[in-house]
Amino acid sequence: MCQYWSAVVRGLTPYTPGEQPKLANLIKLNTNENPYPPSPRVVAAIQAELGDDGARLRLYPDPDGERLKAAVARQFASLDIGPEQVFVGNGSDEVLAHVFQALLKHEAPILFPDITYSFYPVYCGLYGIPYETIALDEHFAIRPGDYTQPNGGIVFPNPNAPTGRPLALSGIETMVLANPDSVVVIDEAYVDFGADTAIALVSQHPNLLVTQTLSKSRSLAGLRVGFAVGHPDLIEALERIKNSFNSYPLDRLALAGAVAALDDAAWFEQTRQAVIQSREHLSQRLGKLGFTVIPSAANFVFARHPDRDAAELARQLRERSIIVRHFKLPRIDQFLRISIGTDGECAALLAALTEILA
Ligand SMILES: *Cc1c(COP(=O)(O)O)cnc(C)c1O
């Protein structure tokens, strides 16, 4: 606290990102990064953009990210998506921040699940948005019928985080139809690992907005690229915020790399399937060690051991140079969220847990 701080800053409770340790040789299974490198075409595209002398870096990037919007539209061309339905930003966290300010800030509280991405209440604090949480059922499932009270908007990830549980598109459509006066935002950070994209519904519903990121399924958490797809009127609201904040949220290297990543379908498919296979194998092996594992549609598993304290397990794993995520929050403080690593990393995790549980 300091006399120079504004009242807004004094009132903030910032998000705490998962640890990015400075130590080498740690097995890092705590922030859901992809264990595989991005497409080699990403590296080539960034090198081409840099050129021999980096002279292009003298120039500002395209403020509208037109090539990237076109690449996103190509991805979803079979769903009839055009570039005018696409917004791009510096990671989907930034896209979501603009969404909260542009589309979710109203008098009525917004709704999100009691167990969900812990950034949502932080954005509410930043922008002064009232919210109410809706309890997941006892199996951590979202019940679409629970989201019917008057609200200023609805937001949740699909699959949900940190549970990994997916919601069927029929459930999402139920919510969108039941709330014609507010925007329903589906945060699809993990959708490529096992859920259906609600972008399929965007063209029929003017109050549905879907966000995605290249951080997880495209292995580009370090490049910071995310996007939203929705009705052009919703996109215009986001552009108005963005152009009142930072005209150039995506730099030249990020724009070039992101287009190359989206256009390499084969790499995407291969790495995504590898993660899905490892997840199924890890879930099965954790089950054999006595863990209860929530069936996951994401690139992580959410698991608890009936006889061991989760915080203690996380500490014991850390002693063995493996970091996983533990949330000290109601209902989930006995769970660990474990990102899917390479097969070697998953094997090291299982070996460490076997030793700890012995
Ligand atoms: C990782 C994640 C994001 C943010 O991803 P960016 O790296 O900012 O694109 C958004 N929502 C959820 C649920 C996430 O897990």
Image (cartoon, rainbow, N blue to C red):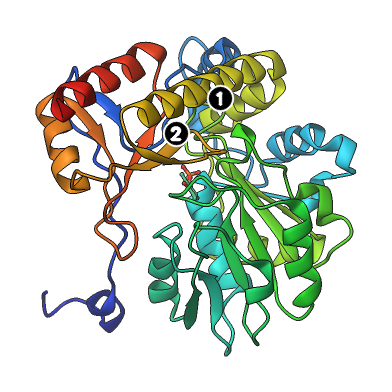
Q: Is residue 237 above or below residue 220?
A: below
Q: Amino acid at mark 1?
A: Ile
Give the labeled residue for mark 1: 276
For residue 288, side relative to residue 314 (left or right)? right
Among the 4 quarters of the image, the one containing residue 5: bottom left
Viewer-nearest residue: 336 or 3: 336
Residue 284 seen by the camera? yes
Q: Residue at x 87, y 42 (%)?
A: 79
Viewer-nearest residue: 118 or 167: 167
Quarter in which the N terminus is drawn: bottom left
Q: Residue at x 27, y 79 (%)?
A: 11
For residue 219, side relative to residue 327 (left or right)? right
Residue farthest to the bottom?
107
Query: In the image, residue 347 lies at what x, y percent?
Result: 32, 15
Q: Is residue 120 above or below residue 312?
A: below
Query: In the image, residue 304 lies at what x, y percent?
Result: 32, 44
Q: Is residue 160 above or below residue 350?
A: below
SS category of the residue bearing label 1? helix
Among the 4 quarters of the image, the one containing residue 233: bottom right
Quarter in which the C terminus is drawn: top left
Residue 221's label in the rendered image is 2
Q: Decide: few, some or many residues near mark 2? Use Cα within 10 Å; few <14, some 14-19, many ≥20.
A: some
Q: Amino acid at mark 2?
A: Ala
Q: Residue at x 77, y 76 (%)?
A: 178
Query: In the image, residue 145 lies at what x, y percent?
Result: 69, 73
Query: In the image, residue 21 lies at what x, y percent?
Result: 19, 33
